[in-house]
Amino acid sequence: MGYYQDALNRMKLRYRAMIESPLTTLWEGWGIGSEGFGGGTYNHAWSGGPLTILSQYIAGIETLEPVFRTFRVAPHPAHLNFIRTQVPLPGGRRIVFEMDKSAHSGTMYLRVPEGTSAQVVLPVEFQRWSVNGEPKNERQLTLSAGEWHFEMSEK
């Protein structure tokens, strides 16, 4: 719905106990032990919904063609200053994405695996960017397989 900051705030509030727990998995219920509902496990897939949301909407990686043959990267970092994620693909390939931003500038790194292409969208926080050192005027680019470094600025 486009409410990226609201979504992050809600996830942080709702999952606080899991995030702050020494356990490294997401639980079946909102509480465990005496805080729990009388059963469940410490590792349950339904709790992983925010992981998909973070990847698809915050990091902005979504498939446009099956098996990520073509994919989009349109990050919406909200208050986050740093994002790093990987999307595993068949054959040991991986999409690798990293974004680091400050108040007025930022960088991104994207590895587009062989056999795929990416549509990359300039984050709304920024007005200008260069890709591998070359200034670009377009807000969206289609990139082939390779490693791509982005410098972004407000002006």
Image: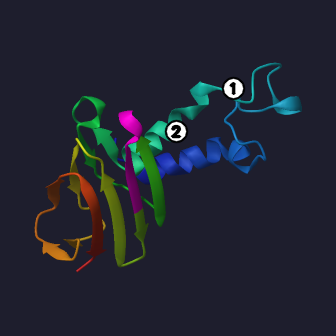
Disc number for residue 28: 1
Above or below, 155 against 27 in this view is below
The C terminus is located in which quarter?
A: bottom left
Give coordinates of residue 128: x percent, y percent.
20, 73
Q: Residue furthest top?
A: 39
**Relative to 127, is 51 on the left or the right?**
right
Q: Residue furthest right?
A: 34
Amino acid marked by disc 1: Glu
Query: Which stretch did the figure color magenta?
Result: 89-98
> Mark 1 or 2 closer to N-term?
1
Q: Residue at x 41, y 50 (%)?
A: 58
Characterize the local packing of mark 1: few (<14), some (14-19) or many (20 or more) Cα atoms within 10 angstroms.
some
Q: Residue at x 73, y 44 (%)?
A: 17
Disc number for residue 50: 2
The verdict on residue 45 being magenta is no
Amino acid marked by disc 2: Pro
Per the image, label 1 sits on a secondary structure element best described as: loop
Q: Residue at x 46, y 45 (%)?
A: 54
Q: Residue furthest left?
A: 137
Give coordinates of residue 55: x percent, y percent.
43, 44
Q: Is residue 146 among the parts visible in the rendering?
A: yes
The verdict on residue 92 being magenta is yes
User: Residue 151 sits in which quadrant?
Assistant: bottom left
**Relative to 93, is 29 on the left or the right?**
right
Q: Nearer the viewer, residue 5 or 108?
A: 108
